[in-house]
Amino acid sequence: MSEQIKNQAITARDVDFAQWYTDVCRKAELMDYSSVKGFIIYRPYGYAIWEQIQTYLDRRFKETGHENVYMPLVIPTSLFQKEKDHVQGFAPETLIATIGGNKEIDDPLIIRPTSEVLFCEHFAKIITSYRDLPKLYNQWCSVVRWEKTTRPFLRGSEFLWQEGHTMHRTEVEARHEALQILEIYKDMGHELLAIPFVTGLKTEKEKFAGAVNTYTVEALMHDGKALQSGTTHYFGTGFAEAFNISFQDKDNTVKHPHQSSWGVSTRLIGAIIMVHGDDNGLVLPPHVAPIQVVIVPIQSQKEGVLAKAEEYRKRLLALGLRVKLDDSDASPGWKFAEYEMKGVPLRIEIGPRDLAKGVLTLARRVDGQKIVIADLDLEAAISNSLEDIHQLMYQKAYQFFTTHMSEAKTLTQIEQALNETTGYVKMMWCGNQTCMDKIKDQYQATARCLPFEQIPFDDHCPVCGEHAEHVAYVARAY
Amino acid sequence: MSEQIKNQAITARDVDFAQWYTDVCRKAELMDYSSVKGFIIYRPYGYAIWEQIQTYLDRRFKETGHENVYMPLVIPTSLFQKEKDHVQGFAPETLIATIGGNKEIDDPLIIRPTSEVLFCEHFAKIITSYRDLPKLYNQWCSVVRWEKTTRPFLRGSEFLWQEGHTMHRTEVEARHEALQILEIYKDMGHELLAIPFVTGLKTEKEKFAGAVNTYTVEALMHDGKALQSGTTHYFGTGFAEAFNISFQDKDNTVKHPHQSSWGVSTRLIGAIIMVHGDDNGLVLPPHVAPIQVVIVPIQSQKEGVLAKAEEYRKRLLALGLRVKLDDSDASPGWKFAEYEMKGVPLRIEIGPRDLAKGVLTLARRVDGQKIVIADLDLEAAISNSLEDIHQLMYQKAYQFFTTHMSEAKTLTQIEQALNETTGYVKMMWCGNQTCMDKIKDQYQATARCLPFEQIPFDDHCPVCGEHAEHVAYVARAY
């Protein structure tokens, strides 16, 4: 894009959070709109963030024995209808192809909103013995859900994701799988995205269409709203029964295998933006940043400046870092603003005066801190600095999470917490959906999860006053 | 799959090549059919081959300055119709979605058969100045073409591919791009797939719908038929004009940028199968093989055998190799047949007698050669052996290509060459499409390319007898 567009200011985060978000998406060149509503263009800088997420997860999945596959893009309507709960959950938002090669298609094809039924049809063919189990499959692809209200990365008619589909001999194994993957998602938050995820169980109402249990990782955005960031499901044998998937077990009896599925999507890019971003744009955690260090030469026409900048680039490349030298003819000030907007974690400034002294300046995006270091210390300083920034960003996000977590024993406290503290409200819950519905009606907040850490702090539900055993996290959410 | 299915023999290659091909696709567990014709399932072993291709190409693309993006899956019909030649080429085989969220869609959506028009619409928005050029974009995705006759990997209603789309200031730059990528495809053949590609220009009739020129890499299959394996295109400014893409050049005049596009697909998996496979199944070149070395313990219940096999696995993993230890309870003989079917380049056999002597046996898939090596030599022997196998496979394929290349100066010679020698027929061509049409009608062979190496060996076209300047390669083809 040309200079004058890039330099336009973005809306302040606390003035209009939604507008700030959209501004950052566009001005940081993460995405653009296409001519079809809800179908976005992932521009190079946005797609590169997704590639970092893919690289991390693909390694973790393969280390734990998973294999990638690719299933068809389309699902015949008749096949889609085999699992009752599943079809009810997805049917209203399907995109359906009815014409192929200029002819009407007899059994219209649903563009996959998720691929459970395709995997199940295949599993039925390839699973016959306990020796064929487990099957640990994953797929990287895009899926389509015809959404009425869309927002870049958060809710789209098409999004990129991975969907894991696994089959196991026993319930214990399948539940272990769902929890193991949830742990990998949580690690990804900690190690890659610098986002502390809350983990827990979804309520019956909020669980996936067709699942016995849904587990979730939830993140807290800067505006105090929660974002479901990934889910894993234990399916039991429901799909296996509907699709006639069975195997002969060690004891020669024929059984249905137990199933799991799990996924995260490009929604994670939205989480990164809304957890870490500020009024100058994107702030990227170092491990997920497509550019980790940008080198901006000052008075680059002066002798030796560009050569030194290029030397730094090569020294950092040799460390395996993702580094960019911007030697374009734009002004240093313009470049500073540009790479701040793009959230590059570290900037190196090198000019003739630095050159004479054998030093360079390091500027941190996260807090604007600038330090001058000796040329010789470059490698150590950059490596340490990137790790410091990652820790700092995680700590900031964790602190935000803890200061936006309230405990509420009455409806008044719930209301107050949602409106004033914002963030999560920890409450006791009787287990009745009507109480959650009331909270939703009155305060537009929903049950995010029943956290795995169940430490009761009261004995009654603040909505109905009945006996309560569950601890639930409630929040307004995307 | 269970044992009895895997052990079924496959059709012999010279008895029924088409059936042999399908047998290998299924028995090597590369793919399976889905319930929708032409939409195949890429099973883990087949997908893993594609992942190796992706890794190689993605590295080469990024080293040459390309960036990955992701465009929408769907194209509004009205947008698709903007470039006249393009729509005529693709319209007959489109899959069209007409219903979204239970409502009819006003401007029905074509599931992308290729993404030129989507890239062009985006380019029109982001290109305004010569400073915005070049744009070097690539996309990994699947595309849909509603085909009447389908074959696994070779022709499908959906296939996986990469599509590059680039915009340049000048014709020279855009043509250089198309040729540079063709060179990368050729390198991939040489370095990864062990396939010698013929490179050249497509004739006007065979070029891509909307291109000024199409360049191609062509491979020769074991049955003497050619396979178009990848193409790159120079578009000129045709799409740029149709989509109003223009930029202000250095001299302040407004111009249309010059465009290229290029792609290879999972068809390459078909090429690997048909170039290298034999009557025992798949034979994989080492660099593209998902499993490079399989370790089969003999009498694995004997003390020390499994421990030694596991030691070998770790030592080879430490070399960065893709290695599998099969310690399942199937018999060694069954395992030999299984990994031969899957084309694993090297097998290690280790039993109690080897253990006592401090040796192991290496068996090569490509020619069945077996050698006994000392335990201490494992690393060096395996590394050398894999490289030897790669060279040998390339040489074999190259020799097959040269012995299936005939020079023909008359129609009779063309017929004889196509029927007896099979493979490519090198002929002089007047440039008139009617002559090629005659060859197609009479002998079912088409112009594969005008090779870059143009060394005339006669002065007239064998079909019409007119003056001929072009050297053309003609062959029966997939």
Image: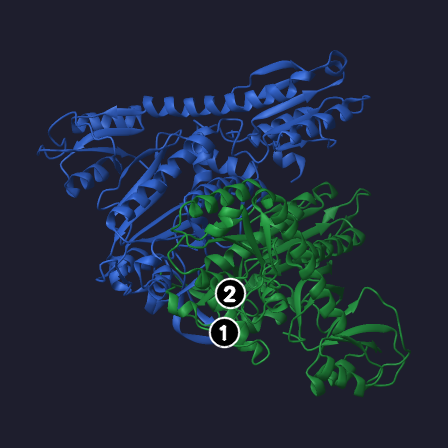
Chain colours: A green, B blue
Q: Is residue A243 visible?
A: no
In the foreground, A240 or B375 = B375
Which chain is home to disc 1?
A
Q: Determine the secondary structure under disc 1.
A: loop
Q: Can you give x and y, in whole percent of width and height, for residue B320 in the image? A: 61, 32
- The image quadrant where one finds the N terminus of chain B is top right
> Is residue B207 depicted above or below A231 in this figure?
above
Residue A232, image quadrant: bottom right
Going from the N terminus, do you reach mark 1 or mark 2 first? Answer: 1
> Is residue A454 depicted above or below B349 in this figure?
below
Q: Can you give x and y, in whole percent of width and height, for residue B3 in the image? A: 67, 35
- At x 29%, y 25%, the residue is B405
* Same-chain check, marks 1 and 2: yes
Q: Can you give x and y, in whole percent of width and height, for residue B475 in the image? A: 28, 33
> Is residue A331 depicted above or below A414 in this figure?
above
Q: Determine the secondary structure under disc 2.
A: helix
The residue where tag 2 is placed is: A341
Marks 1 & 2, CB-CB < 8 Å contact: yes
Q: Can you give x and y, in whole percent of width and height, for residue A406 in the image? A: 79, 77
Residue A10 numbered mark, or none: 1
In the foreground, B47 or A375 = A375
The CA span between labels 1 and 2 is 9 Å
Residue A129, image quadrant: top right
Which chain is home to disc 2?
A
Pointer 1: residues within 10 angstroms few (<14), some, or many (20+)? some
- At x 68%, y 27%, the residue is B315
Q: Residue furthest top?
A: B357
